[in-house]
Image: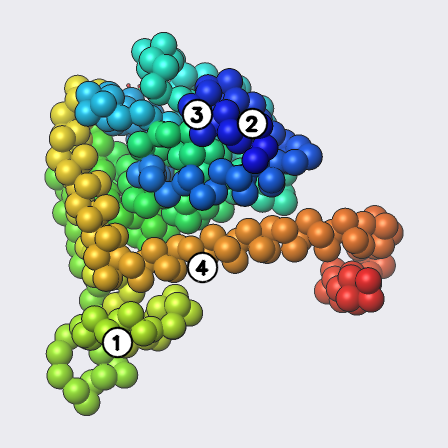
Amino acid sequence: MHPLAERVLQGDVRAAARVMRLVDDRAAGYVQILKDLFPHTGKASVVGITGVPGAGKSTLVDRLIEHARKAGHKVGVVAVDPTSPFSGGSILGDRIRMQRHFLDDEVFIRSLATRGAMGGLSRSCGDVVRVLDAFGCDVVFVETVGVGQDELEVTRTAHTTLVVVPPGGGDEIQAAKAGILEIADVFVVNKADREGADAQVRHLESMIALGREIASGRAQQPTSHGHGHGHVSRSSVESLDVDQVRLGDASVPASDWTPPVLKTVAARNEGIDALVDAIDRHRAFLASPAGARRRRLQSHDQLLALFKDVLADAALSAVRARFDELEPAVARGEVDPYTACEHLLAEFRRR
Ligand SMILES: Nc1nc2c(ncn2[C@@H]2O[C@H](COP(=O)(O)OP(=O)(O)O)[C@@H](O)[C@H]2O)c(=O)[nH]1
Ligand SMILES: [Mg+2]
């Protein structure tokens, strides 16, 4: 075993920090360390927190940390900030908010900044969570902003994804809702001390109900000659192909979990117990047969994402020279990008 991996498993903070940096930089040997750590992962409960900037995610995470610490848990936090090119730049606000936990050596906070277009961040996020898991964190919180590629990675990484929504209906929030409906395991209407919180709760609940109706309508079609409401027995659920579930053409709803909508006032520590309850209930759901299907999907997605990433790296380095040749030609409009890609793929296949 890599000596650093061994130290991480012993709970050595400096080793953990060092490994996370290596993972971040994809420095030589980091994959071996991840391999060594992998058999020691899977114990941490991973909670993703996403939502528009200013919704109160960091404040909420701070409260959740507090709650977990009272329960005696060792806590990891990964703060993903796509707005900052540098780790520790605009994350400073979050640092201040979670500051009191910085002095607690059972709370380990790590910030990640978005990388280039190659999806570096996505991969690091999952890997960093695994390091924290192997390091012995009982719970890991991952905070991200928005509903982009990074959030998809969070749902791939997290067991439970919280979507934090403030009251009120700015265009930004309305636009984000469609996307978040897909990824939320629990909705949190934070800033419930403000006007419009109840309306927001009702709005989200009706969106969830509508989403389920559409899903079960879809589910009923193939079995409409039979009986029931689109629910199928466990054994047939388990025998379902993962891709069938994903494509939504399966004869069962993709999930038997209905996201609850909770109100919190993170600033005043209100509603946190109920939120922790909901997270725990979702964990219990994941341990059920329906949850097993969802875990299976998640592992499928993780492997696929990792493979795509590895493949893109390998392919690009194999055809780098040709890429550098074609790229300016595409920029000048001499070659269209489709043809360029065909050339690159042909070149890759020849190797
Ligand atoms: N009124 C009110 N303000 C809150 C609440 N929770 C957080 N805030 C404030 O909202 C602002 C943004 O919070 P922050 O946690 O940084 O949001 P983030 O961008 O989603 O991480 C801060 O000034 C918080 O103090 C709340 O429940 N009620
Ligand atoms: Mg924040």
Find numbered disc 3 in the image and state the secondary structure of the residue it sits on: loop
What residue would you read off at disc 4?
A: 300
- The residue that appears at 26% across and 76% down in the rendered structure is 236
How far apart are labels 1 and 3 at the CA level?
43 Å
Q: Nearer the viewer, mark 4 or mark 3?
A: 3
Which amino acid type is shown beneath numbered disc 2? Answer: Leu
Q: Is mark 4 within 8 Å of ligand 2?
A: no
Which quadrant would residue 120 be assigned to in this image? Answer: top right
Whichever of callouts 4 and 3 sits on the residue coming sooner in the sequence is 3
How far apart are labels 2 and 1 at the CA level?
45 Å
Quadrant assignment for the C terminus: bottom right
Question: Cβ–Cβ below 8 Å for labels 2 and 1?
Answer: no
Disc assigned to residue 10? 3
Find numbered disc 2 in the image and state the secondary structure of the residue it sits on: helix
- The residue that appears at 38% across and 72% down in the rendered structure is 241
Above or below, 254 against 331 in this view is below
Disc assigned to residue 4? 2
- Residue 273 relative to residue 148: left or right: left
How far apart are labels 4 and 3 at the CA level?
30 Å
